[in-house]
Every structure is written in C-alpha cells, then in structure tokens.
Amino acid sequence: MKNTFEISTGSDRIKSPVNLLFLLSLLLFSAILIGKLGFTISIGLLVLPFVLALFYLIFIYPVVGLYTALFFGFSILGLSRYVDFQVGLLMDGILILTFMAIFFNRFYHKIDWKPAKKDITLLAVIWFGYSIFEFFNPESRSVAAWFSGIRGISLYMLLIVVLTLLLIDNKRKINFFLYLWGVLSLLVSLKGIEQHFLGVDRFEQAWLNEGAAQTHVIFGSLRIFSFLSDAGQFGANQAYSAVVAIILFMEEKNWWKKAFFITVAFLGLYGMLLSGTRGAISIPLAGMGTYFILKKNKFVMISGLSMLVIIFVFLKFTNIGQGNEQIRRMRTAFDLNNPSLQVRLDNQRILSAYLSTRPFGGGIGHAGVKAKKYVPNGFLSNIATDSWYVLIWAEEGIVGLLLHLFILFYIVIKSSHRILYKIRDPILKNKMIALVAGLVGVMVASYGNAVLGTFPTSITIYISMALLLSSEKFDTPLETDLKKIEH
C-alpha cells in the first residue's frame, strides 16, 4: 500500500524548477501583453486556446454549437457593456460554425435532412421568406436597418429550428438543454440579486449614464437588468424560466432534481420582481393557466385556476403589500388608467393611421428606438413600439402581423393537441407541457414588451418550438410497436 505522505499533490509539482519557471513565465507574458496591447486584446489572446478547444468540440460534436448559442443568448448582450466590438456577430458566427461542423462531421456520409422536414421548418422558411420580401418594401429606406432587423425577427428562428431538429435527437439531449437553461437562469438571477444589494459596476453605470437610466432608475430606485439587454427582458425571461421550472419541479420524482428546479423557479420569480417589469406577471398567470388545462385533471385544473384568480384579485382589487416597491409596481400592470399604458395606446393610434395605407409596414429595422441608428429622422423610428406585436405590425404591416400570429397559434394548438391526445410517455409529456406553457406565457407578455424576439428568450423559444413539433420522435412506442420492431 502506498504511503499517504508519499503521494504527490498539485502544489508539490509547482516546486519543480521547470514547472515553477513555466508558471512565472506565463504570468510575466500575461503582464507584458496587458501592458503593451491593453486589457481587452490581451484577454482575447489569453482565452484563444479555450476558443480553439471549443471549435474542436463543435466540429466533433456539433450539438455543442447549439448549446453554445444558448449560452451566448444569455450573456452576449451583457458582454457588450464590457467589450467594445459587435458582440452580436458572435451569435451569427456560432450558428454558421455549427452548420459547417455538421457538414464536416458527416463529410464522408450523406447528411440526413429528414429530421428537419417538419412543419415548423416550413413555417420558419415562410416567415423568413416574407422577411426577405420586405427588402423590396417601398417604404424601406435603409439596407443596413433591414439586415440588422431580419436577424432577430426571422433568421435566427430558421437557423435554430433546423439545428435543433438535426442535433437534439434523444431525450438525454433534451434533458441537457433543460438543465443548461436552468443553470444559466440561475446565474442571471444571482447577478441581478448582486446588482440589487451591492449596486452596479462601473461598466454598467456607464451604460446607465449613456441614457439607460431614463427607464431603469424610477424614483431613485434601480430596475434590475442583470447581464441581459434591459430590465424588461430580465423580468420576462426570469418569469418564463420560472414557469418552466415550476412545472418540471411539480412533475419530477428525483429529490435533487426537484431541489434544482425549485431553486431556479424561486430565484426566477424573485428576479421578475426585482426587474420592476409589470408585464412579466402575465407570464406565470398565462403559463400556469395553460399547465392546469393541459393536465386534464379536474382537481388540478380547478385548484390551480382558483389560485390564479386569487393572485389576480390580490393584485387588482386589494392594497395588501402596497408598501413593497416590487408589489406596488406589479399592481400597476392591472391599472387601465396607468399613464404608461395610455401613452402606449396613443402611440398605437398614431401607428394605426400611418399603417392604414401600408399593409406591408414601414420596413424591417425601421421602427422603434433602435431604428434611430439607421434612420434617425424616420417617422417610425421616433415612435416607441414597446410591444413585440406592435413592432412586427409597424415594420411588416398587418399582413406580416397576421402571418406571425398564425405561426405562433399553429404551434401552440398543434403541440397542445399532441400533448392531450398523442404523447404516451408521461415524462416526455410533462416536459412538453412545460415548454408550451412557457411559450404561451411569453406570447401574452409580448403584447406589453418586445420579449419574444430578444435574447435569451428568443433562443429558448425557438428551440422549444422545434422540440414541441417533433415530440413524436422522442415518444415511447406502444407495446405493439415494440413487437413489430423486435420481429
């Protein structure tokens, strides 16, 4: 038996002159890089080996590229506050790289596109095709605005749907997606809690000073945004993640998995409150209402819907907890006389008159505050759209809005029908219920905020859409089907 005192540890190895010299050389090299090239470039060079390792993994296991896109969805917009370059192109790069990896990974074999031949792919192609058609919109004034806008509106949907159908091909990968989503949501919540109790760092303060403070500091109180694009996206995304996690928690049997999902749910709901995003409250209300209906259990349905009614009455018709800032702000979401709501309705009336003679809208990338970068004097760029649906309406007209709504409701209705009448595996059914409930919640909340098309919600939504409309390939075969396979 080996003597315990003779076992070599990691710290012992540093005592080696060669290893110690290597460590000191690495530290000296890092210091010189930072001194000569600056912090950002130096860090880029230092992380280069890790980037190369990631590239290697993606080309060996292309699904890693899809998971990396999910990670970028949660971090890429926050990263832009710290790094001065077009971080948005990172998402384009990782998605294109993943498609390249599929081709190279199966270079000597014919790529099987059959998993991608689904109605969700056709819907994504139609939606992307309509967005391409918008390039020729006579109201469009900027090619750069169109190119920037089409990515978030339809290109990412098409790419992510196809990648999901091709790469997530078993239940183990679905589970990994759900756990990775949960971990990222936890990190987002913890960062938000840090901002709430410790304040923002100098980069975040600089972002607030550049104009974000107008919407993120209300009566001297900070609306928490974590490392997402803004407080609205933070609140909505955390509420969305919480709905999915709550349903997975209630249907999970394993105790440590239950502990994980309830933690994600609790911190997600807490993050929703810290964000001060009033419209986010509709996500748990609509999402959990969908869950209670799809369970097809009268007791669960009646008790669950009764609970939602109690929450609604509490916020709408009582003043209990009015001293709490978060509860007070959430309560204004149910006030039809709220000044913010009236401003939005006024803007929609202005847009209605403008769009009455423009059935195809004013052009992708031409509406809302972000459009000022490309068309600063444009009519639509000087009217706040706020809502995701109003944004689609303003940029792609009533034709585009109706097409978009058709796609969303088609996905919800078809996936709900499958859950109710076709899926046999109870574990898979519960996961699909969680995904469609979250989708419904986000659809409702997108009337108040541009939630659906913004990272990271858009990434999880598109992956969920693909999984929902391909759920039959993950289902457990009937006993008769198994016998056919055996014979």
Image: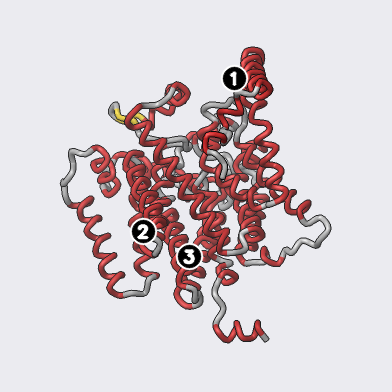
Q: Which residue does the numbered mark 3 point to in the structure image?
A: 432
Q: Position of residue 469 (x, y in %)?
A: 56, 66
Residue at image x 32%, y 30%?
197
Give SS at disc 3: helix
Could you tell me how far apart the alpha carbons at marks 1 and 3 are, in whole angstroms?
Answer: 45 Å
Q: Which corner quadrant holds the N terminus?
A: top right
Q: Position of residue 270 (x, y in %)?
A: 33, 44
Disc 1 marks a residue whose amino acid type is Phe
Q: Is residue 354 left or right of residue 245?
A: right
Q: Position of residue 282 (x, y in %)?
A: 35, 53
Disc 3 marks a residue whose amino acid type is Met
Residue 36 versus residue 299 in the image, above or below: above
Judged from this view, the residue extending furthest toward the right is 108
Residue 20 versus residue 424 in the image, above or below: above
Disc 2 marks a residue whose amino acid type is Ala
Residue 377's image quarter?
Answer: top right
Could you tell me how far apart the alpha carbons at marks 1 and 2 are, in whole angstroms?
Answer: 46 Å
Q: Which residue does the numbered mark 2 point to in the structure image?
A: 286
Mark nearest the camera among 1 and 2 is 1
Could you tell me how far apart the alpha carbons at marks 3 and 2 are, in whole angstroms?
Answer: 16 Å
Q: Earlier in the sequence, mark 1 or mark 3?
A: 1
Q: Which residue does the numbered mark 1 point to in the structure image?
A: 39
